[in-house]
Image: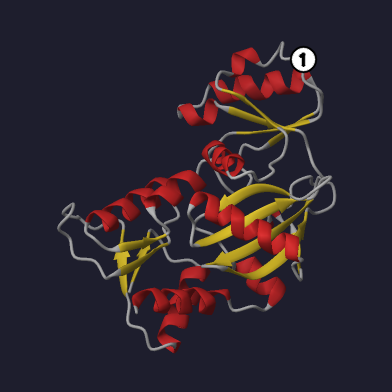
Amino acid sequence: MGISLDIERAEEEFIKRALEELGISYEVISSSTLFSLGESPFPPVVLIRNISATNSAYMAAIVEASGSRAVNSSRAIVLGHDKLLTYSALLRRGLKIPKSWVALDGAELEGAGLDYPLIDKPPIGSWGRLVSLARSPEALSAIAAQRRALPTPALRVHILQRPAELGRDVRCLVVGSRVVACMERRGREGEWRSNAAIGGSATALKPSHEVEELSLKAAEAVGAEVAGVDLLYGESLLVNEVNVVPEFKALYKATGVNVARAIAEYLMELRR
């Protein structure tokens, strides 16, 4: 068994401990290693836990080039780390997402005639970074001007969304073909985002059949075996994100479910 890392966080410590408790030997694979493409030896199954979106996709590709199995696959990681690609994959499977518009060039936003407020976010990024709530055309123009100055082309792309229920969402952790645990997240007072990374609170949620089914279908749509699926409340449940290198410290704290053990057991099954 292999675990690919940039740095070790609490989640990786939990996974390593779970593997040890199950008696599974593992090898930690650092992204700073020099690899011989197609020739470097890897364990049969490698769990990709790199924080860097680029490193995670490339590590999965390097592992696959050598004939081993990456969890998640390079394809799933590429799709999951890009919100626009994720939404495309979800829509092709008939799953509902927030009402969205895409502007590849922010200069065209000013005369778009959109209704406000709108959530504006780039296709890449995590922890709520560069996600803004535009309450007027002037605010959106200011956001676009700021984003045009950024050096990464993907950060200059705008995904505009009609807000669902602000400050509340659901995160479910999918492992293989089952939903391991779910929580409901709420933003702190005055905050419209619910991310735990920016101070949101979380409580355990017993998932309904609809929540479970939608989470599994969303993970399957991007080909993810281990995924954190974010759902939004609206007139119906909407899929907002599929996280392909999911953090789960907050989920463990909210639910008490040993997510790391579930991941370790799944990897053990794959190894057989």
Residue sitting at x 57%, y 40%: 92
Residue 69, image x, y percentages? 32, 63
User: Looking at the picture, how far across and down is residue 28, in whole percent?
Assistant: 32, 70
Q: How is the image coloured?
A: secondary structure
* Residue 180 at x, y percent in the picture: 62, 72
Give above or below for 270 relative to 63. Answer: below
As drawn, 35 above or below 209: above
Figure quadrant of the C terminus:
bottom left
For the point 54% across and 60% down, the residue is 227
Q: Describe the element under mark 1 as helix, strand or loop.
A: loop
- What amino acid is at disc 1? Gly
Up-down relation of residue 53 to residue 134 (above or below): below
- Residue 164, quarter of picture: top right
**One can see residue 214 in this view:** yes
Depth order, front residue of 56/187? 56
> Which one is in front, 92 or 251?
92
Relative to residue 12, is residue 155 depicted above or below?
above
Residue 1 coordinates in the image, percent (x, y): 32, 74
Q: Is residue 116 left or right of residue 144?
A: right
Q: Quadrant of the rendered structure where residue 66 is?
A: bottom left
Give the labeled residue for mark 1. 113
Nearer-the-camera pick, 60 or 210: 210
In this rendering, the count of numbered labels is 1
Q: Which residue is drawn at the image coordinates 67% and 56% (left, top)?
A: 214
Please give the name of the residue rendered at 64% of the width and 45% of the height, measured from the top-left corner: 128
Whether residue 197 is visible to the viewer of this picture, yes or no, is: no
Is the residue marked by circle 1 packed among few (<14), some (14-19), or many (20+) residues within 10 Å?
Answer: few
Relative to 17, 251 lies left or right:
right
